[in-house]
Amino acid sequence: MLRLVEVGVQDKAQRLRFVKMPWVVYRGNPYWVPPIIHDDMHLLDREHHPFWTDSGKGRFWVAERDGKDVGRIAAIRNFPHEKRWKESAGFFGFFECAEQGAAGLEVTKMLHEAVREAVKGWGLTHYYGPANPSSNYAFGALIEGFDLTPRIMMTYNPSYYDGLMKEAGLAKAKDLLAWDLSPKSDFSRIRRIADRIESRHRVRIRDINMKKYKEEIAIIKSIYTDAWSDNWCSCEMSDGEFDAMAKEMLPIVDPDFVYIAEIEGQPVGFSLSLPDANPAVKEINGRLWPFGVPRLLFHTKVWPKLRGIRILTLGIRRKYWTLGIGTSFYIRSHDRVGAKGLTYGEASWILEDNNLMNHALEAMSGKVTRRYRVYRGEA
C-alpha cells in the first residue's frame, strides 16, 4: 500500500528521515556522490538556515510503500523570485523516487499532486524544479551524462526520472549545460582576444585576497546580484544566505581560482571556481564523524583525489557585459589548471539559450558532457 507522509522537518528525526531517503535510490550506483548528511540537515533546518528564515517557505513529504520509504519531494515558495519576476510560480525540490515503471509513476504522481495542492494553496498558478531549494543551490535534473560522476555541487539522478516527470504531467522549461574544458586545448586565439580586451578597456584581473575574505565576499555579492538579475529563474540571495554559502565554501576555496576584474580600480566582475572535491566526498558516504573528516583530509591533502575544478559562477556587471571580460577569467583558470597538474575544468551550469557564453565555450574547444533539465508543472 502506498501512502503519503508529510514530514515536519523542524523535528530532527523526521528531517533525518527525509535527508537519508536517497540512499534507498542509489545503493550500489558507482556514479552517485552521497551528500554530506550534516550539510543537508542544516540546509533543511527551517528555523536556522537563512533560505527559510529570509527568503522562502516549504512543505515536505515522503512516499511510503508497505512501510518502506520509496520517494520524497518538497513544495517551495520563493519570495525573492516572485518579487523579481512578478510571476505566480512556486518550486518543487529534493525529488527522489526509488521505483520505476508503473510503480514509480504512481509515486511520482502522488508526490507532485501534493506539490500542486501546496502551490495552489499559496495562490500560485504553476511551479518549476527541481530546485534544492532555489536556482542558487543544486538546480535541475540530469538528463544526459549518467555514466559520469557529477562535479561538486551538481546533481545526479537515475535516467528514468525524465520519463517519470513527463508522464506525471510536467514539461520542459529550460535545459542547463555543463561544459568540459581541457587544459590541453589550444587557447592561443582566445588568449589574443583576451589580451586585446584587457588592454583596450584597461581591465585588471586579480586574485581574491583571502586576508580580506569578508570584504571580498561583499564585492562578489554586489556583482553577482547585478550580473544575474536578468538570468532566467534567478533570485537574489539574502545577505544571510550569501554569507552562509561563503562560510561553507571557505574550507575548500583555492584562492588561485577566485578572481575579481577591475576597471580603473572599480570591481566589475568575478569568477569563482572550486576544486572538485566530489571524488573525496564519495569516500565518506555522507558522514563527517567520526572518520569522515580525517578521510576527507587524507584524500585532499595527503593522497589527493582532486583532479579538476568546477567553474561555479561567473558574473560581470550588466554595464560591462558585452566587453568579453569573461574570456580573461577562462584563460586564467585554464592556465592555473595546467600549472597545478589538474586534468579538467567544468563550466556549469550554463543556460541552453545563453548564446554568448555557449559560443565562447565552444570556441575554447569545450564539450557539453552533461545536460540538466528544469521542468514546469501546472497547479
Image: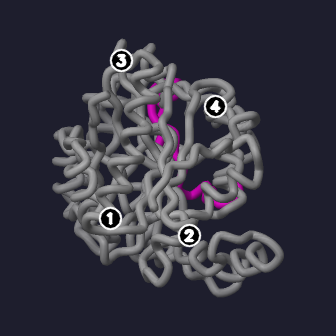
Q: Is residue 80 left or right of residue 44?
A: left
The span shown in magenta is: 250-271
Q: Are marks 2 and 3 in contact (CB under 8 Å)?
A: no
* Residue where numbered disc 2 is placed: 34
Q: Is residue 261 magenta?
A: yes
Instruction: Name the residue at 47% across, 74% down.
Output: 26
Real-space Cα separation, disc 2 to disc 3, in angstroms: 34 Å
Instruction: Name the residue at 36% across, 24% down.
Output: 89
- Viewer-proximal residue among 11 and 260: 11
* Residue 356 visible in the picture: no
Q: Position of residue 40 (x, y in %)?
A: 64, 54
Label 3: how many residues lie within 10 Å, few (<14), some (14-19) or many (20+)?
Answer: some
* Residue 322 visible in the picture: yes
Of the numbered discs 3 and 1, the one sitting upstream in the chain is 3
Q: Position of residue 115 (x, y in %)?
A: 42, 36
Q: Are marks 4 and 2 in contact (CB under 8 Å)?
A: no
Real-space Cα separation, disc 2 to disc 1, in angstroms: 25 Å
Image quadrant where one finds the C terminus: top left
Which dot marks residue 88? 3
* Residue where numbered disc 4 is placed: 52
What's the image's color scheme? one colour
Real-space Cα separation, disc 4 to disc 1, in angstroms: 33 Å
Three-letter residue code for mark 3: Ser
Residue 360 vs 262, above or below: the answer is: below
Three-letter residue code for mark 1: Ala
SS for dot 1: helix
* Residue where numbered disc 1 is placed: 103
SS for dot 2: loop
Which dot marks residue 351? none
